[in-house]
Image: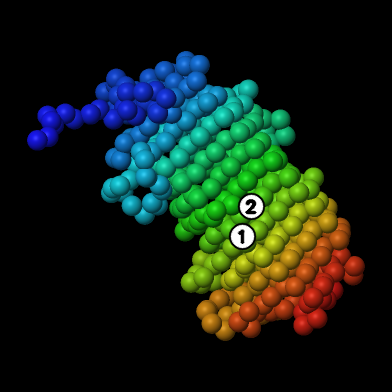
Amino acid sequence: MGGPNVQQVPLAATDPAYGVPLDSFPGATDDEKMRTAMAYAAAQTRPPAIILADKQYSMVRGPYPYFNGFRLVGSLGTTEREFERTGPQCLIDVGGTALFSVPSGGVQNLWVSGIQFRSNSRTTNFQTPITDFASGPVMQDVTMEKLGWVDFGTVMHARHLRVRLDRTYTNSGSDTQFKLAGSDNYYWLNGGYLSSTVLDATKYYVWLTHMSRSQFGPLYITPEKATGIRIDGSYGGLVFSGTLLDSTGRDQTRACQGAAILITGGKGMVFDKLWFFNNAVRPASTGRNPVDRGQVFIRGSAGDLLFNGCQFGGFAAQTGYTPPGTPAIYAATGVTNVKVVAPIAPNAGTKLLQQQSAGIISKYAADDWTLGVA
């Protein structure tokens, strides 16, 4: 015969070593509980994780300043599901100006995982954007993974040191979603998704003001209207591997209007096995001067760049609107030492590299490609 049926309280609900449930804190609203939980966690010698349940929360009284050791996690087994509001799903509806902010002295040792953040207004930011990318506060030793960000003005305008972003879905933002500077970072090494139907052609999905010694993985950007990636500077060691910039299924008004990647400065960058499709359909509509030329447009003082095994898909199998004769890569005068190795143009892609003056681009294992001055 069995013993009495005694229900056990889960250890995670009682032992701070496993985290503290947000719903265990007092407060009439989720904001009150969040403020109390963060104050409690920040006061501990070893701040416990704040654990959310599989349900929908509402937080409109931010921004909440990060503190060293801040951890916010969805319940076990949850991950972002960008198009879902029903379970299993851990979701925070965000209002106000922003949900979080970086203290003026910077912050370190953060971990946020397994939550979908959904803005109530496209003027709301996930965290208060910084504007000083030379000497503003730094986020360091941060991991944010398995997250969804939906309908925000911006997700993250920040300076980073040893930051990891991974397996995230970012959709429907109204401004440049990620504007970043720093070094020693790992972004989307296990993939992620980034798209928006409301971002205009003058914006960027990812804008690196100055980024060195960092790696980007197979982030899948659908660069509707706006340019996928802009890079303004690097000391070197900036590597992209398998990143996709793909405007499949978008017409002339919705596909990436200008270059998929715009590089205006920096040295020592590697672009390895990237994929480009249906970009640079109407470059003049970006309003930039000079007007973008090519699916990759390199200008300014950029130099020492390597494009290895990148693919520039044509339209024999899928419809696209990149104008005929658009080069895969264009480098303007002032740029130096661009090496293009083994490019591929499947499905009747345009096998064309252009430079504004001779000697900027060198091509290797690309005998069937044309390198011209234009």
Element assignment for label 2: strand
Which tag, 1 or 2, sits closer to the chain's start?
Answer: 2
Q: CA distance from mark 1 to mark 2?
A: 7 Å
- Residue found farthest to the right: 359
- Residue found farthest to the front: 1
Badge number at residue 243 = 1
Q: Position of residue 207 (x, y in %)?
A: 64, 49
Task: Look at the picture and state if 232 lies above or below 339.
Answer: above
Residue occupying the point 23% across, 29% down: 8
Task: Look at the picture and state if 217 lies above or below 102.
Answer: below
Quadrant in which the C terminus is drawn: bottom right
Task: Tell me the kind of residue under disc 1.
Answer: Thr
Residue occupying the point 47% across, 22% down: 47
Task: Look at the picture and state if 77 lies above or below 307.
Answer: above
Q: Position of residue 305 (x, y in %)?
A: 79, 58
Residue occupying the point 51% across, 66% down: 254
Quadrant in which the N terminus is drawn: top left
Q: Position of residue 356 (x, y in %)?
A: 84, 68
Count how many numbered circles sit on residues in the image.
2
Callout 1 touching callout 2 (CB < 8 Å): yes
Q: Does residue 235 show up?
A: yes
Residue occupying the point 85% across, 69% down: 362
Q: Position of residue 315 (x, y in %)?
A: 58, 80
| Residue that mark 2 sits on | 216
Q: Which of the 4 quarters of the picture holds residue 322? A: bottom right
Task: Look at the picture and state if 71 lies above or below 155.
Answer: above
**In the shown orientation, is residue 197 left or right of residue 182?**
left
